[in-house]
Amino acid sequence: MNCGFECPRCGHSTLEEILESVTLSSEVIEADEEECEYGRVSWDGGRIDRYQCKNCGWVVPDCKDVKTLYEWLDDEKELNNGQG
Ligand SMILES: [Zn+2]
């Protein structure tokens, strides 16, 4: 299942939320000279910058919160039903 997103540009169904000003924390499992191996990741704070297609980067217009996203998805579904 996904949220019902279908990208108008490329048709992909994976939507991602892009946050800004977020504090990201990663558990460090192991460390060597060059890199760490991370465990669980969590984040704190931040605000939504945009929702976009994971495949092509198409951005949902004027959408910076989940309520607007929900309404946009709902509109799109109705649009698609009308066509089909
Ligand atoms: Zn796309």
Image (tube, helix red, strand yellow):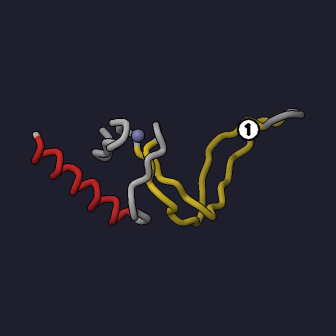
Q: Is 33 on the left or on the right of 58, as rendered?
A: right
Identity of the amino acid at label 1? Ile
Q: How many marks?
A: 1
- Which image quarter holds the N terminus? top left
- Specify the farthest residue to the right: 33
Quadrant of the image occupied by residue 71: bottom left
**Residue 81 screen position, x and y as percent:** 12, 45
Left or right relative to 68: residue 77 = left
Q: Could you say which is closer to the camera, residue 33 or residue 21?
A: 21
- Front position in the image: 56 or 17: 56
Hey, which quadrant is residue 2 in on the image? Answer: top left
Q: Position of residue 33 (x, y in %)?
A: 89, 34
The residue beneath circle 1 is: 29
Residue 57 as seen in the image, left or right of residue 82? right
Mark 1 sits near ligand 1, with its Cβ under 8 Å away: no
Closer to the camera in the image, 54 or 3: 54
Q: Badge 1 local density, few (<14 within 10 Å), some, or many (20+)?
A: few
Q: Residue furthest front?
A: 9
Estimate the x, y position of residue 52 in percent, counting from the top left.
45, 49
**What residue appears at the point 78 percent right and 37 percent down from the top-left corner?**
36
Ligand 1's quadrant is top left
Q: Residue at x 81, y 35 (%)?
A: 35
Snapshot quadrant of residue 68: bottom left
Given residues 84 and 24, the one toward you in this image is 84
**The C terminus is located in which quarter?**
top left
